[in-house]
């Protein structure tokens, strides 16, 4: 598989206004990320709130320029936001996010919502050509043609997310970033949308970055997974490797935290404490205050992502302790 | 005799019936799961039982606690049950605490109401409870406001408040849904430890079947305002009899399975204003026959412990998942 | 916290300065005081002399700079009509205005807030509908109409109360009633919706679920939260204590600030108009400052220097 998108040394920081006058502190949401997205794959990004996964998604789409680092899309650097080149790229890259109701315009019908990007990107002339294309998109995401005239509030959550997906597909994108696309949906509807996204990948060869805190969904849909903790990737591997044999202590706790039917609470790794605030990042490995294997070294230096048994992991203890513990 | 006994509980909002006669018993010390998708009535059942629904809700039927009737009882009698015999914790812990009062004061309020403690005695006991639920440096955090706590810690504060009245039953309404994965694991662990130590019963309301299976002894599955299946946890998950239960289980991706396509329930949950005749699940059910579209099946004993409301339950031992939704 | 306070004060002063500058320029562009003071038939040399006397023949920017310099030294100018210091004329009228606005404000609070709370707690009852009707009536009828109607009924037809002037407490009743009816409606409506919003919050359910009696839920959990929007409205009303009586004072010939500004504008008595506007702006800005500090007291989330964690 060829590389579609490559991120090198991405850093994003925001200023947080602390006091009324002057004194601001900076918060690093993304803190040095190298990531490759291959053509045609679904790459999962998992992490808890504050891990920076949504910020990473926006950076990958070029929706905001990074503080440092660069992104190469098909080998070319991402153009500056709001330039003509950047606008052309918008058609190729789309974002789908969690709350479909806020993503849709309440005053537009389904067909108007879906037809809008066709107009913006000049992809179909108004009239029968556009109607045909909209009908095709409605069919593609599994909506009924008679729903074309409905307004968002007349649809269920799952149907709205289908409209959002159809609208994202209207400009024939090659790259989708889905930020918690099914988190607001009920279990039975979630499965429908997950299957839809998977079909789109199969049929259209779309490349996707799938951001979610729901490990079960990520397990099901993603080829590869990157686990984030406080702005950095701590482990990256194939979905199979991550979920059947997690290595980084954080990944192991995360995977273990998913309640399994019939397994009870025994043998689960319960982490102490909470994910730290990005504005007050612990020294060294950000995970060390919660890690049962951590020692003084872990508090001193930030571990780099290194190759361990066919996966990338950022943990100094991985070579010694974990192997004997596993 | 069961501690809480719900009989033919019905609730209607503005003439739209959302609960169609619930029968449920909770014995002392047991943990009962209540499972279903949003709008199925699982929370409404307990809000109605404790008189916590808005005034426009019409509630009928019977809920007895220790033989004492709650439906239609005077406010004073219901207030004597709330917090003392039955405590409740909620889904979104951060907004379930009053933002303008210090958390310590909110816990002390429960101690005053149910144990007559005031002043220093209340403060000491509140700090002890905060310790028990795992809030670090409780002594200094007693005087902080809810916005200075994370979501997980707010849930711990709510649990401390619930414990203050030494209740016989804790209703946990989606207590982990709004929390991060590793924090969910902590709260589930805390709840089951507390239950072991205090012997209180628990009703665990959740759409997360994995969580229900790890903390409950038995569970009831709800659909469109009715209980459609109830059984002990092992049998329910090993051999679901109702096609909806089965569909719900199958729609959840399994962390141990690979990238298999999810099997799903077609369609969506019916609008309570326009429920189909007969079994509400019939339009989505592959096993439905003419009988199902005509009459409402009763919740009846099917196996030694299980109850199912279905004319065509799935035979025990049918392992083939695809058989149900071909 | 000190820094925050100083910044707020600086901003308040800047607001006053902007208001004053705006008033200065608009007044200078809206008519020639010499013409109005001396009449249309005044001889040209009298007009010129008048202009020279008050500095009106200087370029606008020079007048403006002189004015700024003047107010920096707390000299607010001399009335062109009375030849006495403008600030004295203004301050002399303040008590009369406050004698109307303060009782009116107390009435609005004492009746409006409880009525709003009652309506919120008994939603869709007859009392609730009554409160809503009264509120709509209160703030849709302009005070000049209401004032005239009250005069017609209680002064002209029934003869119970005087129609205008200031000769005793009974003269204040109709003006106060005219001013407070609309405010009571606004307070009731505002309080009602703030309470309804708060009563729907999850923490109210938590308070009920802990077994707290309903009275305590309302007093200890709902009201403190509903106070924030109510205080915002209260701030507006306090800010309007001086400016809020212009129309009513004119109807009832009440010798307060409102009458003074109406007369002074008609005469283009620039120094007095500017001085009244300064007092009004200062009172509004002060009220805003008070509201800002009240927010911090009422809602810990709005306190400064209190970051999370």
Image (cartoon, rainbow, N blue to C red):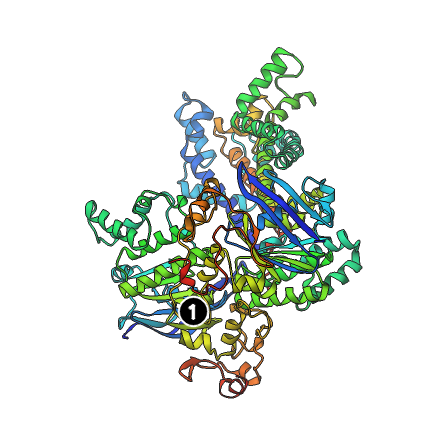
Residue B29 placement, left or right of B258: right
Which quarter shows the N terminus of chain C? bottom right
Q: Which residue is mark 1?
A: A219
Residue C31 % position (x, y):
41, 30
Q: Is residue B188 above or below residue A168?
A: below
Asked whether the viewer can see residue A23, the reply is: no
Task: Measuring from the top left, give residue A309's x and y in whole percent.
Answer: 42, 84
Return the x and y of residue A299 as percentages of the image width and height.
Answer: 55, 81
Between residues B193 and C195, which one lies in front from this camera angle? Answer: B193
Q: Closer to the camera, C244 or C192?
A: C192
Image quadrant occupied by the C terminus of chain C = bottom right
Which residue ends up furthest to the top in the rendered image? C157
Please tell me whether mark 1 sits on a helix, a strand or a loop: helix
Residue in view at x 59 percent, y 70 percent: A265
Relative vertical location of residue A157 with respect to residue A46 in this rendering, above or below = above
- In the rendered view, does A292 fall on the left or right side of A135? right
- The quarter of the displayed image where residue C149 is located: top right
């Amino acid at each position: 598989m060829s590389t579609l998108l490559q991120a090198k040394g991405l850093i994003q920081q925001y200023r947080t206004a602390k006091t009324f006058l002057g004194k601001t502190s900076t918060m690093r949401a993304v803190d040095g990320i190298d990531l490759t997205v291959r053509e045609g794959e679904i790459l999962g990004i998992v992490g808890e709130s504050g891990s920076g996964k949504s910020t990473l998604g926006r950076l990958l789409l070029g929706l905001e320029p990074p503080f440092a680092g660069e992104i190469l899309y098909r080998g070319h650097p991402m153009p500056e936001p709001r330039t003509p080149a950047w606008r052309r790229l918008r058609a190729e890259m789309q974002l789908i996010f969690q709350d479909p109701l806020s993503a849709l315009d309440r005053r537009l019908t389904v067909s108007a919502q879906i037809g809008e990007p066709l107009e913006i990107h000049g992809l179909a002339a108004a009239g029968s050509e556009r109607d045909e294309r909209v009908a095709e998109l409605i069919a593609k995401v599994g909506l009924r043609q008679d729903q074309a005239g409905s307004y968002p509030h007349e649809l269920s959550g799952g149907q709205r997310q289908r409209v959002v997906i159809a609208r994202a597909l209207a400009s024939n994108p090659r790259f989708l970033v889905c930020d918690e696309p099914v988190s607001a949906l009920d279990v039975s509807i979630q499965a429908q949308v997950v299957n839809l996204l998977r079909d789109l990948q199969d049929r259209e060869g779309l490349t996707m970055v799938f951001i979610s805190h729901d490990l079960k969904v990520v397990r099901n849909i993603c080829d590869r997974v990157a686990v984030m903790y406080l702005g950095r990737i701590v482990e990256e591997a194939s979905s199979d490797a991550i979920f059947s044999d997690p290595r980084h202590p954080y990944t192991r706790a995360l995977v273990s935290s998913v309640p399994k039917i019939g397994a009870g609470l025994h043998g689960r790794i319960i982490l102490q404490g909470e994910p730290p605030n990005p504005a007050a990042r612990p020294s060294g490995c950000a995970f060390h205050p919660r890690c049962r294997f951590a020692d003084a070294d872990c508090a001193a230096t930030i571990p780099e992502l290194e190759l361990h048994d066919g996966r990338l992991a950022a943990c100094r203890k991985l070579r010694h302790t974990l192997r004997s513990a596993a | 005799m069961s501690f809480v006994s719900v009989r033919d509980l019905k609730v209607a909002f503005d003439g739209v019936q959302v609960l169609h006669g619930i029968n449920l018993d909770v014995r002392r010390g047991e943990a009962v799961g209540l499972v279903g998708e949003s709008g199925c009535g699982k929370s409404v059942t307990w809000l109605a039982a404790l008189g916590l629904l808005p005034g426009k809700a019409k509630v009928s039927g019977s809920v007895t606690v220790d033989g004492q009737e709650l439906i239609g009882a005077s406010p004073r009698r219901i207030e004597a049950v709330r917090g003392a015999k039955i405590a409740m914790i909620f889904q979104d812990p951060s907004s379930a605490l009053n933002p303008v009062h210090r958390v310590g004061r909110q816990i002390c309020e429960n101690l005053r109401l149910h144990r007559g403690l005031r002043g220093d005695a209340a403060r000491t006991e509140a700090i002890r409870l905060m310790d028990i639920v795992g809030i670090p440096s409780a002594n200094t955090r007693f005087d902080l406001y809810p916005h200075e706590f994370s979501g997980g810690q707010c849930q711990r504060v709510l649990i401390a408040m619930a414990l203050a009245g030494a209740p016989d039953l804790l209703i946990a309404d989606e207590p982990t849904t709004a929390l991060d994965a590793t924090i969910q694991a902590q709260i589930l662990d805390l709840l089951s430890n507390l239950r072991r130590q205090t012997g209180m019963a628990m009703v665990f309301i959740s759409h997360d079947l994995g969580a229900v299976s790890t903390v409950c002894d038995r569970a009831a599955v709800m659909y469109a305002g009715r209980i459609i299946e109830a059984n002990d946890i092992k049998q329910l998950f090993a051999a679901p009899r109702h096609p909806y239960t089965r569909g719900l289980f199958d729609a959840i991706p399994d962390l141990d399975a690979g990238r298999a396509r999810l099997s799903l329930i077609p369609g969506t949950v019916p609008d309570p204003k326009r429920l189909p005749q007969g079994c509400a699940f019939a339009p989505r059910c592959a096993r439905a026959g003419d009988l199902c579209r005509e009459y409402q099946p009763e919740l009846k004993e099917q196996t030694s412990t299980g109850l199912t409301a279905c004319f065509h339950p799935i035979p025990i031992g049918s392992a083939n998942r695809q058989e149900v939704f071909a | 916290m000190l820094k925050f306070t100083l910044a707020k004060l600086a901003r308040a002063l800047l607001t006053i300065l902007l208001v004053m500058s705006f008033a200065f320029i608009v007044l200078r562009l809206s008519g020639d005081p010499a013409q109005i003071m001396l009449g249309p038939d005044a001889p040209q040399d009298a007009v010129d002399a008048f202009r020279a006397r008050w500095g009106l023949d200087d370029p606008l920017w020079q007048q403006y700079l002189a004015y700024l310099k003047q107010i920096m030294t707390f000299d607010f100018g001399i009335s062109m009509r009375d030849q006495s210091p403008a600030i004295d004329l203004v301050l002399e009228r303040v008590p009369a205005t406050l004698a109307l606005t303060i009782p009116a404000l107390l009435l609005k609070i004492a009746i409006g807030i409880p009525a709003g709370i009652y309506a919120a707690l008994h939603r869709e009852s007859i009392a609730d509908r009554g409160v809503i009707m009264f509120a709509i009536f209160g703030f849709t009828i302009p005070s000049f109409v209401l004032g005239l109607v009250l005069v017609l009924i209680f002064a002209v037809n029934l003869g119970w109360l005087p129609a205008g002037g200031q000769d005793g407490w009974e003269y204040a009743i109709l003006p106060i009633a005219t001013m407070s009816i609309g405010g009571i409606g606004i307070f009731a409506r505002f309080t009602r919706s703030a309470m309804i919003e708060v009563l729907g919050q999850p923490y109210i359910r938590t308070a009920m679920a802990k077994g707290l009696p309903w009275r305590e839920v309302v007093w200890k959990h709902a009201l403190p939260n509903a106070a924030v929007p109510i205080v915002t409205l209260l701030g507006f009303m306090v800010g309007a204590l001086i400016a809020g009586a212009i129309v009513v004072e004119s109807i009832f010939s009440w010798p307060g600030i409102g009458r003074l500004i109406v007369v002074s504008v008609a005469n283009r008595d620039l120094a007095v108009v500017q001085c009244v506007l300064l007092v009004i702006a200062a009172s509004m800005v002060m009220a805003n400052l008070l509201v800002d500090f009240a927010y911090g007291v009422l809602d810990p989330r709005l306190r400064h220097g209190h970051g999370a964690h």
